[in-house]
Image (tube, grey):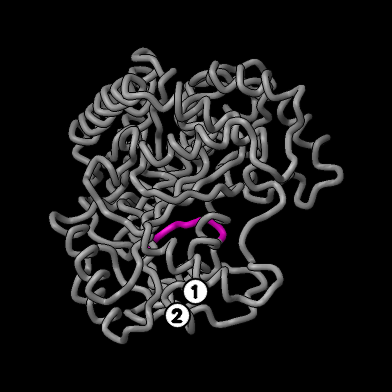
Amino acid sequence: MPEMLRGIERARLQAFARAEAARYADARPRSRVLSREGAAGYYAGVPMHWMLDWPLPFPMVVADASGATLTDADGIELADFCLGDTGSMFGHSPEPVLRALAAQAGHGFTYMLPTIHSGVVGRLLRERFGLPHWQVATTASDANRFALRVARAVTGRPKVLVINGCYHGAVDETYVELADGRARNRPGLIGQFQDLTEGTRIVEFNDLPALERELAAGDVACVITEPVLTNCCMVLPAPGYHAALRRLTRAAGTLLLIDETHTISTGPGGYTRAHALEPDIFVVGKPIAGGVPASVWGFSDGAAARWDEIRRTKAPGHSGLGTTLSANALAMATMRATLEEVMTDAAYAHMEGLAARLAAGLAATVDRFGLPWHVARVGARVEFICAPGPLVNGTEAVAAHAPELEQALHVGLLNRGCLIAPFHNMMLVCPATTGAQVDRLVQAFAEVVGSLAG
């Protein structure tokens, strides 16, 4: 019997992967040269080491990106469903953002003071996301770090509770995982000098008894969670999970932080507004300023009142909150343009419709070939998962990954003109995505899967 991997013969998979890698390399002589020339001066030859995590023989060098189309240095156009892994979730260079950039360009980029856009942005954040008090940071990692500091301060509690399989950027407290039911530092961490489990509790997504047990000690300042697990194989909440999460955190006197950096794909107010969630703290990063680095975090009146008292009584000196470029003038101008003119109801309706079409097309291919895979979706965010589903928690999500198979699928799709996110099987639909591009991806997926399944 041939050796199988998730319904695919491994020998066929390996032959396909070799052929697709050669096809990629043959088509991109300019990228090969530029990636070699660009290596000088960089550690590992790239500006950020994770640029080597794309499953490619050498990095693809980008020459241009506009709307939902990316063009590489060899002039090859790709339908872009990665969109900077959500950083460009509303498309590359939206016209309102370009206008805001041009208008701000002659008036300075950063000056550590409010701008003429600040008041408008504050009002828009209140109206869109519901919470009354807002702060601006540069990345979601920063926003989450600052929010967790405030949560500890206002509750007087030392611990944070995270969800196994979560993703909250480069936030130390969240780099823990469950292994055989026990918490441990994630083994891939570099330079970690302390045991993160001393300050962090961890439970599985959808596991309410475990959540209640971990909150019972009364030492958890904040539960930080995505409303849907997204940076692993996608895991959706069970019916009633979020209502119980809110009830249990309130009963324990614990703040609830909802990180919508990825699930802002759900709708204009994110998953939170679409499903009437009631967080104490709300974070969204990457796409909030149309691709210009920015993030926001909002919080409740109760948290603000307690923070006011702490600020009145604390010793002078640095609070550990904020960076010099936070809320810079460029970010505020582009954030206003994004909130007013890009993240519109009409844009989300377009994204939702095409994402549903994409998910249905991918699922039809999976069914056609009888593979033990499934497709998951949250708003404009779609993922094919090479394992049966739906998944229930982070442990199942980790086990669902099949790196050898996924890497071959990614290169195969790229060679057929479609780019998806490199670290998982995520695809985003943006306001500029066309029906033809969705159909192209569905067809490319069918061709690749057909080649693999024989």
Q: Which residue is mark 2?
A: 156
Dominant secondary structure, magenta = loop
Q: Which mark is residue 153?
A: 1
Residue 380: percent from left, percent from top: 34, 32
The label number, if any, that marks residue 84 in the structure image: none
x and y percentages locating residue 378 in the rendered image: 29, 40
Q: Nearer the viewer, residue 434 or 99?
A: 99
Q: Position of residue 8 (x, y in %)?
A: 32, 44
Mark 1: secondary structure: helix
Q: Height in image: 190 above or below 240?
A: below
Magenta stretch holds residue 78: no
Other residues around mark 1 within 10 Å, as few (<14) / some (14–19) / many (≥20): some
Q: Which residue: 46% across, 25% down?
A: 418
Counting from the top left corner in percent of width and height, residue 209 is at: 19, 75
Which amino acid type is shown beneath numbered disc 1?
A: Ala
Evaluate whether residue 309 shows in this view.
Answer: yes
Tell me if label 2 and label 1 are in contact, CB under 8 Å: yes
The residue sitting at the bottom extreme is 217
What range is drawn magenta here?
A: 165-170
Binning the other alpha carbons within 10 Å of mark 2 as few (below 14), some (14 to 19) or many (20 upward) gives few
Residue 244, placed above or below residue 127: below
- Tell me the amino acid under the disc marked 2: Gly
Q: Is residue 168 magenta?
A: yes
